[in-house]
Amino acid sequence: MANSFDVTRRAALHFLAAAPVLANTAAANAAPVEPSFAVTTPIHIHSLSLRVRDLEKMTYFYNAVIGLDVLRAEPNQTTLGKDGKPLVTLIKRPDDDLDDPTTAGLYHTAFLMPTRKDLGRWLIVAYMNGVPFTGFADHSVSEALYLNDPEGNGIEVYADRPHQNWNWADNRVVMGSAQLDLDNLVEGLPEDAELPYSAPSGFRIGHVHMRVGDTQLAQDFYVKATGLDLTALIANESAAFFSNGRYHHHIGANIWQSRNAGQRPQKMSGLEDAAFSIQPGLMDGLRQRLKAHGSDTQESGSTLETLDPWGTKIRFIAS
């Protein structure tokens, strides 16, 4: 382990070193913090479920490296979250085929830190323990770190800049992809960091980015059927972004590797379902839009479930 934290030099080497993950058995008891803007809009991301081939290894990773608390552990399923709120459910499917990035499915789960300092602290923890990264970016509205879990599912860990300072033009948010200033992100923060890591109170899923077969079909579903707003569209329409309440995006959808993908195979590891929280008063409108769109729905208690155009379960939980 280096005596000084030369993160810029390490970034140039693409963080290729990897280290074993240790299990985190301690839960954080920090006092709740003010919720991030992303989870205060009337519709926002609630949680998601992943089909995993190695439940123990994946539980260790999301617990010890990402910092989620184990809320419920069963022989074939683990639910992890923060502040008692479930965020990720891991479902044991050892016989599944490994997720194929050319199919529709999960591009990445984006975990939102409450503050920029929290993001810097986690970067130090990950760096000091040899966690390999796949990229870094300054998106103007946010600062983001990218990596994969042990089964190849994409992950973004990010912090938003104050939403009052985001730039909008014609109801589209201005997002970029510039080089991230890693030195500034970690400046003044302690370098002593060991696993297991425990994420701070207020840690949530800010958005989910999907692989889709067609961004026009994604727009048709997420705007016309679910009622989200289109907030950004890359010029060649290779990616579209959707949100509620003028967040930069709760859902991303791209065809970078999955152009023309059809129905997602049923026995494949990766995304099982994605869930939104929705204010109860908005459920009737959602039902009407989904019916008009021709989407089949099922309801159980406070949860309405449908399928996106590629067969992935999308759930809406009235809360």
Image: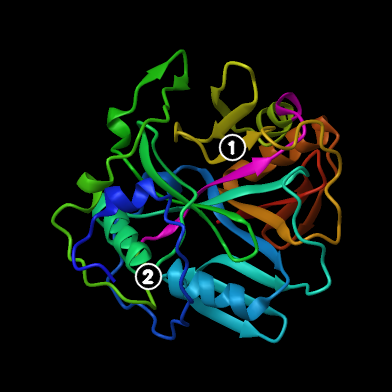
* Residue located at (45% from left, 63% from top): 17
* Residue located at (31% from left, 66% from top): 32
Instruction: Give 213 or 29, whichever is nearer the viewer.
Output: 213
Instruction: Give 15 or 34, whichever is nearer the viewer.
Output: 15
Looking at the rendered structure, the kind of residue marked 1 is: Gly
Say if 205 sits above or below 307 in the image: below
Q: Nearer the viewer, mark 2 or mark 1?
A: 2
Residue 198 lies in what quarter of the image? bottom left
* Residue located at (45% from left, 75% from top): 64
In terms of secondary structure, where does tag 1 sit? strand
**Is 44 displayed left or right of 131 in the figure?**
right
Q: Are marks 2 and 1 in contact (CB under 8 Å)?
A: no
Q: Position of residue 210 (x, y in %)?
A: 65, 42
Residue 162 drawn in magenta:
no
Res. 129 mark: 2
- Report whether residue 200 is seen: no
Identify the image quadrant of the C terminus: bottom right
Looking at the rendered structure, the kind of residue marked 2 is: Asn
**Residue for badge 1:** 252
**Is 183 displayed left or right of 314 in the figure?**
left
Q: Position of residue 68 (x, y in %)?
A: 46, 70
Q: Position of residue 184 (x, y in %)?
A: 20, 45
**From which residue to which does the magenta span run?**
202-217
In terms of secondary structure, where does tag 2 sit? loop
**Is 195 displayed left or right of 62 in the figure?**
left
* Residue located at (86% from left, 39% from top): 262
Residue 208 drawn in magenta:
yes
Residue at the extreme top: 170
Q: How is the image coloured?
A: rainbow
